[in-house]
Image (cartoon, grey):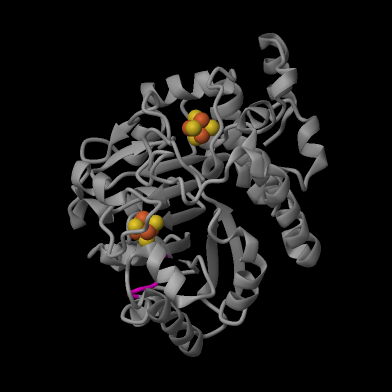
């Protein structure tokens, strides 16, 4: 715990406070190895992204990257996409990462979970996240446009839980909350709780201009709420949180504002992405933000190492804008979880690194750094 806090602090001093090339690599890596998918979810455009960004990292380079990530002392690597179980190199790469004791999670729609149960167990994956949106197989398969998906996913979860030792991997469901299921979200989560170790939900999002899952609002109209439904949505979420105190967390309480008044969150929610996390795209480019087109690639792993892309001139440019709060944007997946976690540590808000509105003048920053021992 203490070592972890010191590591986090050192990372943030280099990247967030001073914006200098950091001797530490990203603490979190999100690896999107493919945008291919066997589902066609109505709220997702991954197949368009797959055509635009095919896979372009050979296995030999992927294994080297895994070792570079290990040497960079990354804490957690998450694989998402696309459907990661369609990527032929997945388990070879995970095995390489596990040699460095990195925590690994995969996000899957669950269709192939049972087929790959042996690989998941032998590669020692730490967490498996399965996306399920309904307690009705018919509804879920309709949204995902893949008949049989719901049953296959539940079968896969049961198989993993039956065969695993010591509760690993931990299996968690995540439900995309939207206008289609919010009225029955508690029932969905309770139902999934019968099969999963943990359950969670996240808000449907749209209009991320440069995101692989982006769909325009008019394509998402069946999933988004109308402006006059704000009070109903708030009441439904309040009731869910009241009935299920496990969701009494900032992360969930911010969802109505995110849907109806995202501008309110711009000041409150700071972007931590460029200081803590690197994302690897299927073609090998790296990014810290997959939402805005003006925050494009910070490098390409076909030509550069993890550390070079983490400390590239383009990364330093993006960090400078964001640490000076010139980005003026908010997105759900990149920001809210980390900021919600910070809410548990009131002391964090008193430290100048965290605080948007009390940036220190430059000479005070230098003094502050000099007083921090690590
Ligand atoms: S949301 Fe996930 S499962 Fe659905 S199409 Fe997109 S990548 Fe595939
Ligand atoms: S807050 Fe803005 S810069 Fe940061 S990850 Fe989200 S969209 Fe990108």
**Front-lying residue, 321 or 28:** 321
The secondary structure that most of the magenta stretch takes on is loop
Residue at the limit of the structure toward the front, as seen here: 228
Query: 341 and 202: which one is in front?
Result: 202
State yes or no: residue 4 in magenta. no
Q: Which quadrant: the C terminus?
A: top right
* Quarter of the image with the N terminus in it: bottom right
User: Which region of the structure is painted magenta?
Assistant: 108-112
Q: Position of residue 207 (x, y in %)?
A: 44, 36
Task: Answer whether residue 109 is magenta in the image.
Answer: yes
Q: Position of residue 215 (x, y in %)?
A: 38, 43
Q: Quadrant of ligand 1?
A: bottom left
12 or 269, nearer to the observer: 269
213 over 351 or under it: above or below: below
Residue at (75% x, 52% y) in the render: 235
Residue 322 position, x and y percent, is: 54, 23
Q: Residue furthest bottom?
A: 162
Residue 160: image quadrant is bottom left
The answer to whether residue 80 is visible is: no
Asked if residue 302 shows in the view, the reply is: yes
The quarter of the picture where residue 361 lies is top right
Task: Name the residue located 33 percent from the left edge and 61 percent from the top edge.
Answer: 83
């Amino acid at each position: 715990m203490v070592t972890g806090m010191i590591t986090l602090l050192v990372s943030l001093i280099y990247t967030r406070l001073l914006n200098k090339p950091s001797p530490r690599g990203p603490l979190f890596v999100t690896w999107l190895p493919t945008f291919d998918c066997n589902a066609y979810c109505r709220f997702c455009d991954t197949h368009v992204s797959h055509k635009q960004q095919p896979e372009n990292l050979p296995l030999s380079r992927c294994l080297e990257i895994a070792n570079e990530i290990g040497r960079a002392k990354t804490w957690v690597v998450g694989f998402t996409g696309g459907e990661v179980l369609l990527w032929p190199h997945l388990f070879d790469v995970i095995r390489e990462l596990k040699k460095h004791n990195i925590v690994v999670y995969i996000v899957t729609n669950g269709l192939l979970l049972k087929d790959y149960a042996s690989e998941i167990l032998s590669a020692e994956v730490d967490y498996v996240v399965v996306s399920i949106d309904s307690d009705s197989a018919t509804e879920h398969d309709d949204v995902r446009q893949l008949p049989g998906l719901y049953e296959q996913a539940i079968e896969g979860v049961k198989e993993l839980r039956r065969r695993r030792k010591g509760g690993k991997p931990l299996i968690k469901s995540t439900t995309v909350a939207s206008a289609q299921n919010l009225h029955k979200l508690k029932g969905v989560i309770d139902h999934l709780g019968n099969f999963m170790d943990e359950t969670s939900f996240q808000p449907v999002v749209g209009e991320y201009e440069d995101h692989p899952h982006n769909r325009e609002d008019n394509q998402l109209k069946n999933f988004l709420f109308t402006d006059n439904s704000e009070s109903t949505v708030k009441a439904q979420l309040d009731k869910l949180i009241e009935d299920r105190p496990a969701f009494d967390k900032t992360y969930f309480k911010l969802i109505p504002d995110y849907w109806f008044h995202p501008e309110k969150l711009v000041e409150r929610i700071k972007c931590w992405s460029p200081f803590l996390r690197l994302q690897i795209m299927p073609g090998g480019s790296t990014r810290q933000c997959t939402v805005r087109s003006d925050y494009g690639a910070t490098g390409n792993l076909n030509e550069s190492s993890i550390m070079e892309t983490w400390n590239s001139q383009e990364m330093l440019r993006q960090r400078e804008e964001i640490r000076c709060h010139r980005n003026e944007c908010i997105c759900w997946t990149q920001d809210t979880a980390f900021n919600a976690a910070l809410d548990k540590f009131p002391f964090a808000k008193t430290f100048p690194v965290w605080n948007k509105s009390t940036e220190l003048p430059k000479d005070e920053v230098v003094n502050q750094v000099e007083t921090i021992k690590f």
